[in-house]
């Protein structure tokens, strides 16, 4: 029995775009054997971000997160592959770049800038359901 191909949303956040890391992040995704299905450069508005982060509304980091994500361009990617949702999250590394393992995107390129919100370069969907919802929002 073969595993069905999954799709996931990968966002290169404003810090990754500003630091010109989009190409390196895409290189790592493709080197892992995943396929780029669609890509776009987006300047998201508050409405899109509020819908994307609806589950975090009311949490202390919500407003700083929305402000950070509005602060610059984002590269949105639709990526496909076997177990790509789990695989990309491993490739990205832990949310906190300080503890992310070397060899991961956040471990190699991220750091704690001492700001109100983690500027951790990338976002990846955390489940099939989240991927479907997020891909519908961004594409």
Image (cartoon, rainbow, N blue to C red):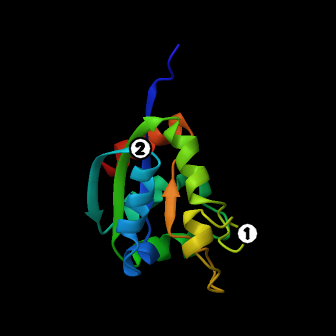
Furthest residue in direction bottom, as rendered: 114
- Give the percent coordinates (x, y) of residue 124: 51, 52
Helix, strand or loop at disc 2? loop
Furthest residue in direction top, as rendered: 1
Tell which of 123 and 103 is nearer to you.
Answer: 103
Residue denoted by label 2:
34
Query: How many other residues sit within 10 Å of disc 2, few (<14), some (14-19) or many (≥20)?
Result: many
The reply, left or right, for residue 122 in relation to residue 46 is right
Residue denoted by label 1:
99
- Dividing the picture into quadrants, the one containing residue 46 is bottom left
At 56% from the left edge and 70% from the top edge, which residue is drawn?
120
From the image, state whether disc 2 or disc 1 is nearer to you. 2
Query: How many other residues sit within 10 Å of disc 1, few (<14), some (14-19) or many (≥20)?
Result: some
The reply, left or right, for residue 70 in relation to residue 103 is left
The reply, left or right, for residue 111 in relation to residue 84 is right
Q: Looking at the rendered structure, which numbered label has been put on residue 44?
A: none
Q: Is residue 45 visible?
A: no
Q: Is residue 41 above or below residue 98?
A: above
The reply, left or right, for residue 90 in relation to residue 22 is right
- Give the percent coordinates (x, y) of residue 94: 67, 60
């Amino acid at each position: 029995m073969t595993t069905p191909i999954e799709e996931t949303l990968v966002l290169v956040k404003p810090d990754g775009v500003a630091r010109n890391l989009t190409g390196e992040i895409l290189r790592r995704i493709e080197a892992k054997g995943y396929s780029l299905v669609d890509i776009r450069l987006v300047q998201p508005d508050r409405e899109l971000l509020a819908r994307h982060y609806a589950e975090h509304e009311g949490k202390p980091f919500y407003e700083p997160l929305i402000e950070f994500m509005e602060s610059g361009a984002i590269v949105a990617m639709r990526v496909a592959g076997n177990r790509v949702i789990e695989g990309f999250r491993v490739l990205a590394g832990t949310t906190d770049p300080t503890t992310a393992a070397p060899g991961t995107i956040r471990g190699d390129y991220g750091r704690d800038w001492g700001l109100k919100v983690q500027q951790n370069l990338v976002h990846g969907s955390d489940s099939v359901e989240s991927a479907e919802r997020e891909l519908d929002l961004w594409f």
